[in-house]
Image (cartoon, helix red, strand yellow):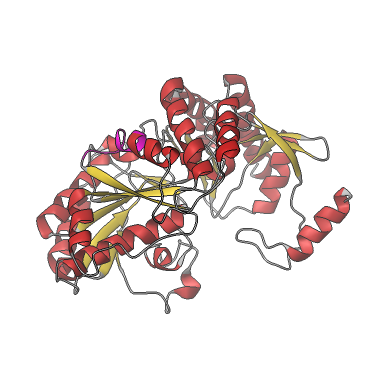
């Protein structure tokens, strides 16, 4: 098909994420990807500042990941996980359980981060059901959070900023506490402590679990809060008999400078979700971990099994490339602090722009928060002129580059962001 025909068909018939089926703006046609670059069919080359929504941490077309997936393809692309197992699933589980927080002993594979959250919430509910405490069936979380677009996951996304407000009167009613007021670099969270203690004291009896993104609130606003806040939530969960679910889907596998963001707090949750970067951006895949206490209680209760089983659970291709990605991450020891320093060095200059409300950096995450909502179409058009690819939302223009990005490439990316902002908001 000709390029124009492909784009025309795409525009008329294919629904893209968070878009209108009647959109008048054609999508950008990518021909291939290599390293940190997207090669467009029109000949233009862009630096991907999004790591394909935070997943492609090793960049594109990496030889180690290519080899893992093609080698596995020659053996088998898929086999059902019910009653069967295979080496990639077992080896990956062993590798993951060696790096996740202590106390997590069981892993449940699924096919996306949102489903991993659904699995985590079902685990919590079935745990209390198995203990004869079925009245503990509500969830608590913090405002400005985001946990996915599937049904139960939507119920614990912020009812205003979580993109799902039109479903608010249809979803299960959950509890939302104020988002942390203490920033990552500010350890004064006495006001947060007072609110949280009161909340747990008044609501713990009906709570199955408290779920939150550790340290970094992603799609709900890219806010970074102090590790001490997570420690406080853990202490209160333990004190009041509430399970703690940590959602590391966006933050896991090195993005914040730690293997997992919860490592900043040295917190071990009852249940933890991972996804996105687990396969290095090659395949949709996710996992939910839980303690032996959770798994054994569910298994010893009625009906004696955990009631979930995705068709593509434990897919061998996904397990193989995930194993290669995790091992590559540990072998390469990417200098995330150097990425953070360079993000601060360049993006930090935007604090002088009157239209900018805040610039914040943590690990390989750079966020420029504007005072007003951004026009995504305008910003992306200007970014294309600079040779960079970004996907801003709300008031945020942010980047999460691949870890393999060079200093020169990162400088072009960050300087491009500065040029766009300074030209649009001059």
Compare residues 412 and 350 and report the one nearer the observer: 412
Q: Is residue 147 visible?
A: no
Does 421 appear in magenta? Answer: no
Magenta-highlighted residues? 95-102
Classify residue 277 as left or right of residue 130: right
Residue drawn at (56%, 53%) of the image: 393
Q: Main secondary structure of the magenta part?
A: loop
Say above or below: 305 vs 223: below
The residue shown at (61%, 58%) is: 17
The single residue placed furthest to the left in the displayed view is 239
**Residue 297 shows in this picture:** yes
Q: Position of residue 195 (x, y in %)?
A: 20, 59
Decide: is 55 above or below 409. below
The residue nearer to you, when weighing 122 against 379, is: 122
Assign the C terminus to one quadrant of the image.
top right
Q: Residue 349: give x, y in percent of width and height.
A: 53, 30
Q: How far across and down, in percent of the image, does residue 242 sit?
A: 18, 59
């Amino acid at each position: 098909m000709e390029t124009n025909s492909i784009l025309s068909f795409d525009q008329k018939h294919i629904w893209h994420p968070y878009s209108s089926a009647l959109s008048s703006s054609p999508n950008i046609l990518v021909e291939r990807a290599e390293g940190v670059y997207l090669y467009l069919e029109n000949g233009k080359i862009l630096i991907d500042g999004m790591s394909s929504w935070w997943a492609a941490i090793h960049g594109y077309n990496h030889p180690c990941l290519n080899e893992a997936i093609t080698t596995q393809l020659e053996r088998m692309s898929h086999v059902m996980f019910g009653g069967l197992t295979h080496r990639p699933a077992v080896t990956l589980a062993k590798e993951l359980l060696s790096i996740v927080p202590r106390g997590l002993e069981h892993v449940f594979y699924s096919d996306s981060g949102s489903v991993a959250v659904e699995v985590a919430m079902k685990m919590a509910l079935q745990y209390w059901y198995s203990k004869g405490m079925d009245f503990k069936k509500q969830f608590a979380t913090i405002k400005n959070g985001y946990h996915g677009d599937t049904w139960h996951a939507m119920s614990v996304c912020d009812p205003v900023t979580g993109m799902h407000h039109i479903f608010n009167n249809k979803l299960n009613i959950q509890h939302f506490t104020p988002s942390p007021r203490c920033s990552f670099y500010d350890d004064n969270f006495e006001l947060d402590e007072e609110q949280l203690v009161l909340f747990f004291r008044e609501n713990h009896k009906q709570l199955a679990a408290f779920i939150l993104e550790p340290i970094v609130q992603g799609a709900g606003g890219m806010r970074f809060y102090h590790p001490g806040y997570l420690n406080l939530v853990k202490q209160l969960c333990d004190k009041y008999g509430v399970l703690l679910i940590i959602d590391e889907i966006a933050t896991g596998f090195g993005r914040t400078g730690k293997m997992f963001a919860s490592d900043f707090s040295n917190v071990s949750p009852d249940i933890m979700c991972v996804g996105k970067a687990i396969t290095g951006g090659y395949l949709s895949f996710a996992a939910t971990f839980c303690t032996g206490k959770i798994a054994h209680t569910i298994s010893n209760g009625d009906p004696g099994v955990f009631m979930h089983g995705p068709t593509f659970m434990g897919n061998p291709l996904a397990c193989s490339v995930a194993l290669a990605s995790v091992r590559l991450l540990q072998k390469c020891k990417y200098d995330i602090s150097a990425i953070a320093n360079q993000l601060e060095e360049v993006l930090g200059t935007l604090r002088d722009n009157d239209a900018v409300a805040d610039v914040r950096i943590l690990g390989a995450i750079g966020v420029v928060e504007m005072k007003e909502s951004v026009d995504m179409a305008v910003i992306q058009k200007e970014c294309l002129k600079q040779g960079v690819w970004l996907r801003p939302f709300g008031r945020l223009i942010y980047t999460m580059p691949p870890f393999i990005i060079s200093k020169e490439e990162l400088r072009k990316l960050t300087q491009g962001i500065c040029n766009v902002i300074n030209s649009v908001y001059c």
